[in-house]
Image (tube, coloured by chain):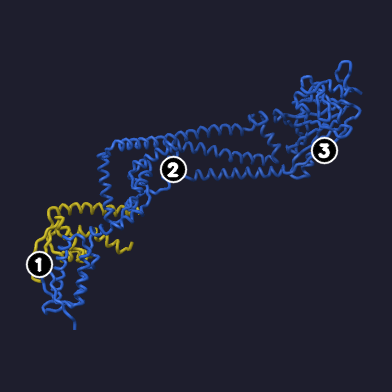
Chain colours: A yellow, B blue
Amino acid sequence: MKIENTKAQMRKGVLEYCILSILNNGEAYPSEIIDQLKKAKLIVVEGTLYPLLTRLKNAEILSYRWEESTSGPPRKYYQLTSNGTDFLKELATTWDELVKAVELTGKQG
Amino acid sequence: MNQTVTVNISGIVFHIEVDAYDTLKNYLNKIKGYFNNSEEREEIMMDIEARIAELFTNMMGEKNQVITSVNVESVIETMGKPEDYITEEDEESQNQTEETKFRKDKKFFRDPDQRILGGVASGIGAYLGIDVIWTRLFFVLAFLIWGFGPLAYIILWIIIPEAKTASDKLKMKGEAVNVDNIGKTFEAEAKKVNEKLKSVNTSKIGQFLETFFNGLGQVLKAIFKVLGNVIGFAFIAIGVFLAIGFIAGLSGSDMILAITSEGIFSIESSDFFNLIFVSEDQFHLAVFGIILLIGIPIIAIIYGGVKMLFKIKTHYSVALSLTIFWIVGAAICTLVGIKMGAELSSDEKVVESVGIPNNYNSYNLVTNNDDIPGEGILDGQFSSISLDDEYIYQNDVRVNIYKSKLDSGYIKIIKYAHGESKKAAKFKAKSIEYNYHIDDSTINLNHYITTIKSHKIRGQHIRVQLYLPVGKSIYLSPSSYEVIYDIDNVTDTWDKEMIGKKWVMLDKGLTCVDCTDIEGTTSDKLKIRFPELYNTENEEPTIKK
């Protein structure tokens, strides 16, 4: 297994969680989300984002509204639904468990 | 100069070079191809095209330029390669084929979460994909029908590794090991805990088997515990018993009872052993070696028993030093054994021959049964040893009677001895003193031999062979019971029944003359053949001059 594949897998695993966390702070459109992720040093390309956002929207975790833009086509501004907020809470718990598991397994070795 | 195509991306018009257009078109098609769900696909493609349009708009600025391949590549860089568009849901459908392949790479582990004893049955169940109840049932049946269950189970328990880490557990079940599945594993474990609290297993057979195996597991654990205690106690008891016997055996001046194949004999140990060992030092060394050789295993048994019974943990150095001392003892015994072996390595014999007067037809064999001189140190059924300051007296004398090929009879006295060399052995043999007399027709044999004390006990013994020509007879007096030993005779009569009777040497062997109770021989027959033996008056055989 190439190390790059593993790393990519790890990043994909947390991507959803990070996106929801970003949106928890306020609505944003895809490019903004990317920028925030970049600021947090989580490197993703936009291509990864769009399908994910769409699926989250279809699962009613996110919703969006259109906003006209001066520089180009209208933008989708995404925000968390109430389901989304719950979903985020559960992910947060799971995240803590994972962190602990990683710590403990690291100690055993 | 390049050809330009006019294209509409998300409702916005762009001029794009034809090469760039091809590249962009391929890119978008590829992305499309990664999405299986058409509903989502449409929406996602719209979002992507909108973003691409935005990027192009930013790049073009005011001058209404044409999009070049460079621009397209820059956009592709920003948006990401088509492979990056795949999310986990796509991956799952793609990985259908991968997973089935992975299942064949299942690794065989013991399942520690589903164990009752060692998780062997559950591990087998996971590997084969069958419910653990059936594998357990298999083991029980195997034991009841064939009896091989427990041993196989224990062997498997030792050989098969336990699935410790989450990845092991996943491998055991054959699932792909990645972040998702590890998360699933934890979810599953949380679920399991809940289920255990709720006791989900409703099927009757399942419930019964579960309680049965739980009970069985408890019983086995209890048995092993008790067994450990019992073994511990047994070890202590055996060890103490052996120790008592051994110590009793060692205390020199007491009489000890030792049972050998010849009967019961008792010895005064140190005197006796001094006659065997070359020197007192060697004797003491041998004793020390034996104490180590036999005593240490006894101590070890008691020690092991105490450890087991009282569950005491001791440092390994105890066992180590015991072993070392035992080895020392073994080495000493071996060395002494080798030395003693050398002492006995050669054996020689010396033969003395003396004729018996020929003018008699009948002889008497008698033995002087006076007390053997010296103080007894070994008193057995067949032989005894006594000694005084200078000599050892052993009453190991045996007489046998053979047919003489000559016209006259004779006695052969063969003296045997062992020694450290042929010369020494011969010397010791020669030094054996044995007394006997021949007075007319009476042969008087001594019932013991005398050897020099300093020659020690080196297997000195003698054999007396009496050769009788055919036609001559001999009367075995009752006094001779001690020295005669397995004398060949025609009727296979036992020694003790031969004494007090007269025996004649015939062609076929030594035959009884006056045994009225022995089959196959009548006085009539003998009368015919050897009339000179009989006195016609009283029909009793007499000595004729």
Q: Which residue is labeled 3 in the image? A: B351
- Secondary structure of residue under mark 1: loop
Are callouts 2 and 3 both on one chain?
Answer: yes
- Residue B211 in the image: x percent, y percent? 32, 36
Give the residue type at disc 1: Pro
Residue A74, disc: 1
Neighbourhood count class around disc 3 (C-alpha, 10 Å): few under 14, some 14–19, many 20 upward = some
Determine whether, in the image, residue B297 is placed left or right of residue B134: right
Q: Choose mark 1 or mark 3, whichever is in front.
A: 1
In which quadrant is the N terminus of chain B drawn? bottom left
Question: Real-space Cα distance between discs 1 and 2?
Answer: 72 Å
The image shows residue B236, relative to residue B128, as above or below, that is above
Q: Residue furthest bottom?
A: B1
Give the residue type at disc 3: Val
The image shows residue A40, relative to residue B201, as above or below, that is below
- Residue B323 in the image: x percent, y percent? 54, 44
Cβ–Cβ below 8 Å for labels 2 and 3? no
- Residue at the image position 42 percent from the left and 39 percent from the top: B142
The image shows residue B281, relative to residue B234, as above or below, that is below
Front residue of B421 and B11? B11
Front residue of B227 and B320? B227
Determine whether, in the image, residue B170 is placed left or right of residue B408: left
- Residue B533 in the image: x percent, y percent? 88, 22
**Chain label for disc 2:** B
- Secondary structure of residue under mark 3: strand
Q: Is residue B523 visible?
A: yes
Q: Which residue is labeled 2 in the image? A: B152
Give the residue type at disc 2: Ala
